[in-house]
Structure formats: structure tokens, C-alpha cells
Image (cartoon, helix red, strand yellow):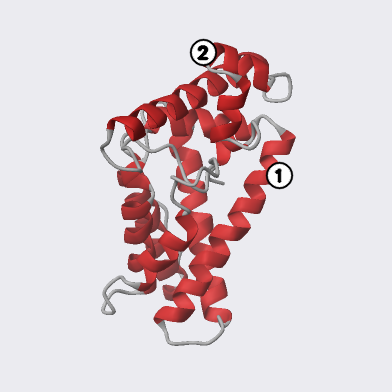
């Protein structure tokens, strides 16, 4: 599963002011220091003190950006950062009505999440989550939230008060496709652009579904 509910963003989320740029630079420095240490000695053996020392900040500064070291992987809760799940919900709902559900979700994910990511940091976050039982469990919790967000957005697109089985099944299939695609991309030496990988993953899902309905599952 994807490792962050917010992702590691390239742009300054709070604007272009000098103060906000400095804060964003500090946030990324803490993330990079933590991910380096996780790779070197593992998540469980890495302390907040070690992260702060390598990032050249105080412990208090670390906790201004992240509530716990797991938030370095899954996204901090600073009031200047966007809560991406409600944003994703609105992006899905506001896609053109003429689009089918798969297309709407795919473009919402590409626009609201993938377009803001820094690829190398995403790979390190993903690997860190895979190598820690605690982080793996937290990642599963985030997956549940992503699926619920997609499910509820699809229900709203169809004018439903509550998600029906179609919405639930569609959300599960799309999240599984997305998660598998990101995992494959992370572990491929020359995975290319993540956006292209996701486009391919969703196209493959559509091809498989068409094959199942036609009574065949031909492989390329």
C-alpha cells in the first residue's frame, strides 16, 4: 500500500513567503534525515534524538513538525499541511460527470497526489514502511481510509446517500490497482515516471475486466 496519506511534496504547501519556504525546507531536512537513518539501522532502532541531530535541529523542532517518528513516513499533522483525503474526495466528486468512475478516480489521484510527489523520497518512505511491522500496520490503516474516501466520493458522484455495493467493490478494486502499481514502481530499477506507471496500471485493470466479461484473460 502507498505509505503516506499526504506524500512528500515538492512545492511549498503554505505559499511563497520566505518564512514558509524556510519551514518547508526544515520539514524536508527532517524527513530526509529520518529516512536515511531508517535505511541504515531500521525504523525501530532509530530515535527522534538521532533524527534531530542528523537534521541539525532540536528535538522540540522535530515535534513541531511531526507528532512521532512514524509521521515522517506517513505525513505530519502540521496545521500548514493539507489533509489530502478530503481533498482527494472533492477532486473525485468534482471530476466531469461524463467521466466513468475509474477515469475520475485515476485523474483525481494523479492531480491531487502524484503531481506533488518527489519520487526518490516516496521510494524511501515505501521501503521503510515495508521493513517495519509497526509501519506496515499503520500503512494498512491508511489503506482503509483511502478506500473509504474513494467509496464515499463515488457514492456522492452517483447521488447516493450511502455507498452501495457497486461503490464499495469499485473502491476496493481501484485501491488494489493503485497500491499494486505503486509497489511495482518502487521495486523496479527503471520504473520510469510514477504517473505513467499508474496510467498503465489502470489500463491493465480495464483490460483484465474486459477480458473477464468476454470470457478470456489473455496475457500480453
* Residue closer to the observer: 90 or 133: 90
Q: Does residue 35 appear to the left or right of 154 in the view shown?
A: right
For discs 1 and 2, the disc positioned in front in the rendered view: 2
Residue 167 appears in view? yes
Residue 156 quadrant: bottom left
- Label 2's element? loop
Q: Which residue is mark 1?
A: 137
The mark that comes first in sequence, 1 or 2, is 2
Q: Is residue 183 above or below residue 33?
A: below
Q: Which mark is residue 118?
A: none
Which secondary structure lies at badge 1? helix
Q: Position of residue 207 (x, y in %)?
A: 38, 62
User: Residue at 48% of width from left, 79% of height from top?
Assistant: 155
Q: In this picture, is 186 found above or below 87?
A: above
**Residue occupying image coordinates x 59% and y 54%:** 143
Instruction: Give x and y (percent) for residue 172.
Output: 56, 65
Please state if 166 lies on the left or on the right of 209 as rendered.
right
- Is residue 208 among what the camera can see? no
Residue, x 33% and y 38% (percent of image)? 12
Which residue is identified by label 2? 56
Asked where in the image residue 10 lies, by quadrant, the reply is top left
Quarter-of-image position of residue 16: top left
Against 198, residue 41 (above or below) is above
Q: Nearer the viewer, residue 7 or 54?
A: 54
Amino acid at each position: 500500500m502507498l505509505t503516506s496519506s499526504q506524500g512528500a511534496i515538492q512545492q511549498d504547501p503554505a505559499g511563497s513567503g520566505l518564512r514558509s519556504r524556510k519551514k518547508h525546507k526544515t520539514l524536508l531536512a527532517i524527513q530526509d534525515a529520518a529516512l536515511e537513518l531508517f535505511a541504515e539501522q531500521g525504523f525501530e532502532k532509530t530515535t527522534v534524538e538521532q533524527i534531530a541531530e542528523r537534521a541539525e535541529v532540536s528535538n522540540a523542532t522535530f515535534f513541531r513538525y511531526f507528532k512521532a517518528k512514524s509521521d515522517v513516513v506517513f505525513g505530519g499533522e502540521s496545521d500548514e499541511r493539507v489533509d489530502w483525503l478530503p481533498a482527494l474526495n472533492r477532486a473525485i466528486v468534482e471530476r466531469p460527470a461524463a467521466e466513468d468512475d475509474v477515469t475520475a478516480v485515476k485523474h483525481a489521484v494523479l492531480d491531487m497526489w502524484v503531481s506533488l510527489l518527489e519520487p526518490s523520497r516516496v521510494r524511501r518512505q515505501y521501503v521503510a514502511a515495508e521493513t517495519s511491522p509497526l509501519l506496515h500496520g499503520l500503512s494498512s490503516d491508511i489503506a482503509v481510509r483511502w478506500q473509504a474516501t474513494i467509496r464515499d466520493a463515488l457514492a456522492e458522484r452517483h447521488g447516493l446517500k450511502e455507498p452501495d455495493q457497486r461503490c464499495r467493490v469499485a473502491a476496493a478494486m481501484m485501491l488494489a490497482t493503485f497500491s499494486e502499481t505503486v509497489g511495482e514502481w518502487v521495486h523496479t530499477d527503471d520504473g520510469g515516471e510514477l504517473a505513467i506507471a499508474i496510467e498503465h496500471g489502470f489500463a491493465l485493470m480495464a483490460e483484465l475486466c474486459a477480458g473477464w466479461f468476454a470470457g478470456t484473460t489473455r496475457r500480453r
